[in-house]
Image (cartoon, grey):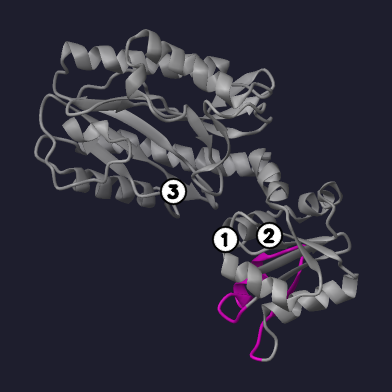
Amino acid sequence: MNHLKQIAAGLDAYGIDAMLVNSEPGEFYAIGFHGEGNVVVTREGCYYFTDSRYIEAANDLVTGAQITMTDRGRNYKAMVQEVIDRHSIKALGFEDAYLSVADYNGWKEGLTAQLVPAQDLLTGLRASKDEEELARMRKAQDITDAAFTAICRFIKPGVTEQEIAARLQYEMLCRGAEKMSFDPIVASGPNGSKPHAIPSDKKVALGEFITMDFGCKFGGYCSDMTRTVALGEPTEEMRKVYDVVLQAQLAGIAAAKAGVPGRDIHNAAAKVIEEAGYGDYFGHGFGHSVGIEIHESPNANHSNEKPMPEGAAVSAEPGIYLPGKFGVRIEDVLILRAGGNEDITRSPKELIIL
């Protein structure tokens, strides 16, 4: 899998003669390969430069690009300059969201072409997933759903948040995950009011909510899901808050489709929480895009006025967080279509009592 043709087709729209891609996610999107190197996309051809650690694998896996290995007398900058000379490149796009100031200055001083910020070229392409990308995301989500089923059998009073987090990773790796999308979040009882709590040695106890936010990578693409379960019988307040979050998520999902501004999707969910009296306890956006990275653009939040694109993979994760008490978050991943969306998360959302 690669997206070299799509990148080349976008050069004219950004007024550039070629695109330099050297971020980790950009490299994988461009050539479908996890290494450390530089991709140069021109209208006439594509190039991939890497070092001795990755050259053999690159020759086996990378298609659609001329592959060359660096050596002591010919570094990345020299190789890119050769392409600039060969194709008479005047304007070279680069990933300005990933390049540090020091790296930018290094490239600028060593090349004759003008460096032009062109992050939006890749960001725009990555926002709409093709069917091969979506197939990998569905598989990653299948693994994550199966891990959730397994973890519900593992949780019992006395196990720690750290043990639950470790077990989640084990369950995903055993089912074919390459690695985690991010470090799992496991938060029980009062720790649940921290949306990005770090799993601790706290033991889970009867009468508590346990929020688990986790995901894995398959084929280079992420899954992401959150479920909040009750260990033992929940209180009336816990049930009420859980139901509000669930209804908010369902309202956001109902509003989510291609062509709808991200803020409208967010507001559909936020309205439910606000009207229930918990507006002050929902401080983040309804969702973010997911793909090669766990947080991509565009977002379904209050500040995004732009229409969401067809094929975007977006999380649906409202939450309510009551300091000193508990928190509830429920998260699925949606594929946006013109007439609605596909929810690729299969785990039940009704309150589970363990």
Q: CA distance from mark 1 to mark 3?
A: 14 Å
Left or right, 144 with reference to 234: right
Q: Nearer the viewer, mark 1 or mark 3?
A: 1
Quadrant where the C terminus lies? top left
User: Can the viewer see residue 59 in this picture?
Assistant: no
Left or right, 144 with reference to 325: right
Q: CA distance from mark 3 to mark 2?
A: 20 Å
Q: Earlier in the sequence, mark 2 or mark 1?
A: 1
Residue at position x 67%, y 69% from top? 38
Residue at position x 38%, y 17% from top? 246
Instruction: Give the image location of residue 102, x and y in percent.
Output: 58, 70
Displayed quadrant of residue 347: top left
Considering the numbered disc 3 on the image, is that residue within a helix, a strand or a loop? Answer: loop
For disc 1, the marked residue is: 24
Question: Between residues 42 and 112, which one lies in front from this camera angle?
Answer: 112
Q: Earlier in the sequence, mark 3 or mark 2?
A: 2
For disc 3, the marked residue is: 181
Q: Is residue 70 above or below residue 40?
A: below
Instruction: Give the image location of residue 188, x and y in percent.
Output: 20, 34
Start-end of magenta stretch: 51-72
Q: Earlier in the sequence, mark 1 or mark 3?
A: 1
For disc 2, the marked residue is: 31
Name which residue type carries label 1.
Glu
Name which residue type carries label 2.
Ile
